Amino acid sequence: MRLIRFGENGKERPGILKDDNIIDLKEIYPDIPDICESFFREGWFEKVKNVKNIGKKMNVHIACPINKPSKIICLGKNYLEHAKEGGFDVSKSPLIFCKAGSALSGPFDPIIMPHTSSQIDWEVELAFIISKEGKRIKKEEVFNYIAGFCIMNDVSARDVQFADSQWFRGKSFDTFAPLGPSIVTLDEIGDINNLRLICIVDGEIMQDGNTKDMIFNIESIVENISQDMTLLPGDVISTGTPSGVGIFRNPPIVLKSGNIVECRIEKIGSIINEVK
């Protein structure tokens, strides 16, 4: 199943992407909530799996697939080659930080250049959505707490990120978390620990990695985070980026207005964002 949100800003509706068609879940279940915490708590995630409609073709805006998560948790330095390219030590436990919920944007929405930074960078990442509340989740139970997977571009203002003593501000500008294109359930993916992920800028491959190269896998990440932090339905966790970011190139490459950034993960799809 591929869950989406679609429609104009402020009027998004839940749907299922099936081939090239969209199933409008609001037409089938008029009382269905948006895809948010209540969607999972009230059992809609399980209920919509039984929908048999074929849907129809629609020329509509595809929105961020989750609305107002309680938190967006990200992993830093979770690929060895990325840690090396930045001159960082390899962490002995997952290095986590957060992005503001207001940074979320749709999979095809623009990345807006801020006034306070001139070093905007890309980071393709595998992200996933939590489906039920949990704390101290054991590794063998982790996938029972995951609704599905998507792609996030962890857009970063490097000059701000490195000037601050922590990363929150430089990672949280508006539009700095494009997410999507849908929430893809594991049955449509297969081996989540062996997926190619690439980032393409203006047609040139900049990052080319594989989720098998993550230092901490999904089970370890969830177990670690949930030891002291309750995960809530709808929470977003993003698992880090492979090598090939712009700032560590020689000379550095930064995004400019007009660039087209595509983040692609096999079996999940692509998000494509123009820089404006």
Image: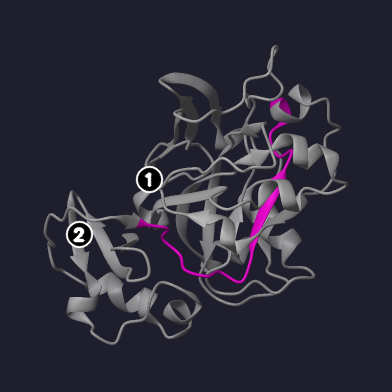
Q: Residue at x 72, y 22 (%)?
A: 248
- For the residue pair 134 and 246, the one nearer the viewer reads as 246
Q: Residue at x 45, y 59 (%)?
A: 148
Near-viewer residue (223 or 160): 160
State the quadrant of the N terminus: bottom left
Q: Is residue 91 visible?
A: no
Is residue 120 found left or right of 262 in the rendered image? right
Identify which amino acid the numbered label 1 is placed on: Phe
Residue 207, image quadrant: top right
Q: Position of residue 63 (x, y in %)?
A: 37, 58
As measured in the structure, the alpha-carbon distance from the residue carrying label 2 to the one carrying label 1 is: 17 Å
Helix, strand, or loop for circle 2?
strand
Q: Left or right: where does residue 65 sit relative to residue 127? A: left
The amino acid at mark 2 is: Ile
Image spot of residue 135 (x, y percent): 70, 74
For label 1, count other residues whose C-alpha is less than 10 Å away and answer few (under 14), some (14-19) or many (20+): many
Task: Please provide the residue range marked out in magenta.
Answer: 63-81
Horizontal side of residue 195 vs 118, given as left or right: left
Q: Which residue is mark 1?
A: 108
Quarter location, residue 13: bottom left
Tell me which label, 2 or 1, sits earlier in the chain.
2
Indicate which disc residue 196 carries: none
- Classify residue 97 by image quadrant: bottom right
